[in-house]
């Protein structure tokens, strides 16, 4: 009974244990389900991203398809923006994932974190305030405790004190560009570097100065001057801008601003120099007035001598900046000059700064304008040659303007430094040449899908052979029947394949696509399509010969390209037939000609004489087609010969005869 009682008493305990086990299993099952849901969502995201990237590659290679966009009329107009935004979003997500998965100490602040960037931007604005506003009110405006200027100074003091702790907890960059993750090493580098300067300029001297002034109220002028001493250190804060600018330089902010303003390096350097000089002149002008204000305008001061003690603040500031500017530029008219020993010392120090300013300014201006003048002189020489050529050949003004626009566009894109780009690149190492080729034409190789799977050697061989070209809105790149002489890469805008004469677009190629290789790879000299631009379109063009020469060295890439060309031709043909069928149904295209069925033998009434005439006509038509193809090839060769002749005429006389002989031999071969 006791055992039975024990057993019965243990039953609830066992039941509770089974319930607890089942609840635990349920929790683990729900946890497993939640993990399963997370992985399933992640898998679907990966699939969707993969599908978008695949669709992007398909459109860049094969163009927009009617089955893809026939129901969305607005897609064709902004398909490139949509795809690039999707691809950019994918890249940002991948970079964010890489950053999140990389182990980084939680107690350190990452230099690329959003919080650190915002803090540095806030600190930079405070330093701008310190460099521009603080010297002005210290020199010309009386500040009282708890007015808005004094409160602003207290905020700046607090921010700079907080910045010391931020710098201690921030990770720094090593010399090789990697991030140092050791707190001890980062703290040691900061304590042996900028720490002492930061802590000196962050001490709360604002409160000290106001306390001293309040206690010395009603005292002699001597004590009032001593009370103003702590304010002078605030001007030293402006030198912290050098530290912040150095930090931003490491984060490529200066380069991004340069790209945004579209300045070359010399002009951007000159702009930075001019802005720095303006800030220096402003600060020095304020100091020039401040040294007399600090002494309550003694009799031997320039302010007293020019009777400017009670003049408006703007006039005082204008005279001070005027003195600083004429002194630093070594002009020195002498209308405002030093009287007291303190003013003389400040003047001499500022004159030494002026010597360096003068030499640096002359050198920067000379190099900057020399570079601009060289580029302009090259452009003017080309435009002058075009003018003489148009006069001698009698071309129309419209054609002349088109040539001028093309020359200006090519010069602006290529410049004069790339005239001998092959020679320049051969002097560099392979990796450096590859980096240069990736940067050419605003990084076109990174945007064009054609180069995405190519070897470094291919990019180095291919990119220098490209030349820029620009098409206006609805301008034809080429028409059906033209000579197939080049392959084009789209870096801006869009190209449409159209049907003549309705100009209906049945396929579009977007930014990052390439076109024109089908006829060249199939060794067909004549174009089979009409290609027209949609909006202003910028292209990179490579000639037929250069294109084939490069691929002659890369056989595997050539095989892959031929396969893609066959697929493109098939899809373009299908899209063209579908568009023609749509036009034919809407009576905008004549019906397809179908030859009549041959009559039966008993219905044939034609004699052998007429049949022979028809056969001869067919042979003549076939011969004329072949003749037209050959004439198109000869015409292209003659055009190249004319270009070679113009180039030979610019050579010295000894080389001219040699190359003229070679040219005549080539012409003889063409004529034969």
Image: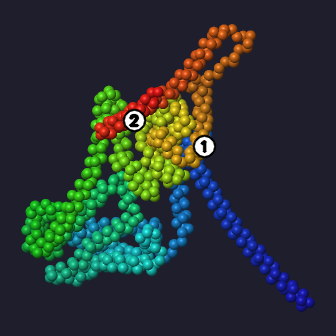
Q: Could you say where residue 623 lies in the image, as x and y percent from the top left?
A: 55, 22
Q: Which residue is drawn at 55% across and 52% down?
A: 453
Q: Could you say where residue 571 lies in the image, as x and y percent from the top left?
A: 60, 38
Q: Specify the quadrant that holds the N terminus.
A: bottom right
Mark 1 is surrounded, within 10 Å at the Cα level, by few (under 14), some (14 to 19) or many (20 or more) other residues, namely few
State left or right for residue 226 relative to residue 534. left
State left or right for residue 601 relative to residue 284. right
Query: Which residue matches tag 1?
Result: 563
State the mark number for residue 63.
Answer: none
Secondary-structure class at tag 2 = helix
Q: Could you say where residue 38 lies in the image, as x and y percent from the top left?
A: 65, 64
Q: Can you say whether 59 is above or below 618 in the image?
A: below
Q: Could you say where residue 40 lies in the image, as x and y percent from the top left?
A: 66, 60
Q: Residue at x 36, y 31 (%)?
A: 399
Tag in front: 1 or 2: 2
Q: Residue at x 61, y 33 (%)?
A: 578
Residue closer to the observer: 582 or 266: 266
Query: Which residue matches tag 2?
Result: 662
Q: Which colour scheme is used?
A: rainbow
Quarter of the figure with residue 618: top right
């Amino acid at each position: 009974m006791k055992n039975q009682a024990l057993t019965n008493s243990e039953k609830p305990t066992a039941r509770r244990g089974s319930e607890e086990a089942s609840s635990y299993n349920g929790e683990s099952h729900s946890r497993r389900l939640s993990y399963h849901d997370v992985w399933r969502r992640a898998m679907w995201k990966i699939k969707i991203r993969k599908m978008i990237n695949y669709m992007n590659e398909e459109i860049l290679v094969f163009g927009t398809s009617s089955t893809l966009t026939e129901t969305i009329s607005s897609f064709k107009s902004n398909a490139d923006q949509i795809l690039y935004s999707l691809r950019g979003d994918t890249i940002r997500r991948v970079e964010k994932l890489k950053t999140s998965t990389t182990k980084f100490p939680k107690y350190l602040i990452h230099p690329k974190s959003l919080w650190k960037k915002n803090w540095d931007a806030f600190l930079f604005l405070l330093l701008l305030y310190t460099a521009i506003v603080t010297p002005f009110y210290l020199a010309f405006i009386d500040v009282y405790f708890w007015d808005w200027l004094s409160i602003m100074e207290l905020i700046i003091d607090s921010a700079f004190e907080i910045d010391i702790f931020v710098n201690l907890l921030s990770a720094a960059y090593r010399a090789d560009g990697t991030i140092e993750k050791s707190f001890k090493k980062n703290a040691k580098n900061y304590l042996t570097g900028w720490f002492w300067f930061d802590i000196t300029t962050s001490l709360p001297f604002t409160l000290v100065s106001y306390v001293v002034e309040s206690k010395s109220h009603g005292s002699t002028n001597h004590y009032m001057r001593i009370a103003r001493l702590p304010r002078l250190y605030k001007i030293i804060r402006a030198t912290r801008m050098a530290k912040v600018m150095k930090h931003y330089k490491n984060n490529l902010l200066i380069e991004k601003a340069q790209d945004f303003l579209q300045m070359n390096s010399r002009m951007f350097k000159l702009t930075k120099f001019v802005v720095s000089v303006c800030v220096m002149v402003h600060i020095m002008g304020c100091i020039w007035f401040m040294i007399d204000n600090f002494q309550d305008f003694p009799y031997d001061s320039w302010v007293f001598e020019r009777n400017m003690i009670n003049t408006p603040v703007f006039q005082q500031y204008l005279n001070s900046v005027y003195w600083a500017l004429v002194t630093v530029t070594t002009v020195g008219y002498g209308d405002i000059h030093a009287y007291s020993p303190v003013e003389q010392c400040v003047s001499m120090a500022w004159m030494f700064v002026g010597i360096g300013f003068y030499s640096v300014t002359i050198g920067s201006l000379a190099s900057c304008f020399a570079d601009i003048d060289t580029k302009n002189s090259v452009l003017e020489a080309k435009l002058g040659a075009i003018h003489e050529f148009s006069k001698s050949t009698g071309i129309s003004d419209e054609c002349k303007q088109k040539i001028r626009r093309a020359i200006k566009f090519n010069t602006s894109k290529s410049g004069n430094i790339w005239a001998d780009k092959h020679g320049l690149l051969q002097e560099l190492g392979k990796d450096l040449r590859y980096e240069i080729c990736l940067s050419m034409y605003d990084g076109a190789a990174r945007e064009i899908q054609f180069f995405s799977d190519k070897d470094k050697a291919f990019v180095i061989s291919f990119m220098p052979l490209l030349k820029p070209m620009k098409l206006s809105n609805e301008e034809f790149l080429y028409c059906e029947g033209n000579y197939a002489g080049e392959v084009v890469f789209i870096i801006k805008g869009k190209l449409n394949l159209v049907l003549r004469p309705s100009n209906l677009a049945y396929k579009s190629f977007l930014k990052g696509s390439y076109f024109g290789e089908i006829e060249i790879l199939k060794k067909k000299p004549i174009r089979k399509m009409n290609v027209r631009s949609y909006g202003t379109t910028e292209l990179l063009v490579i000639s037929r010969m250069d294109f084939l020469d490069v691929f002659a060295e890369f056989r595997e890439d050539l095989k892959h390209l031929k396969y893609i060309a066959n697929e493109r031709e098939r899809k373009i043909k299908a899209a063209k037939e579908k568009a023609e069928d749509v036009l034919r149904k809407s009576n905008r295209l004549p019906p397809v000609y179908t030859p009549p069925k041959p009559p039966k033998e008993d219905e044939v009434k034609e004699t052998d004489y007429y049949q022979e005439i028809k056969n001869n006509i067919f042979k003549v038509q076939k011969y004329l087609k072949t003749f037209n193809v050959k004439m198109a090839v000869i015409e292209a060769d003659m055009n190249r010969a004319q270009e070679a002749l113009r180039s030979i005429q610019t050579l010295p006389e000894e080389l001219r005869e040699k190359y003229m002989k070679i040219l005549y031999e080539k012409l003889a071969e063409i004529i034969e």
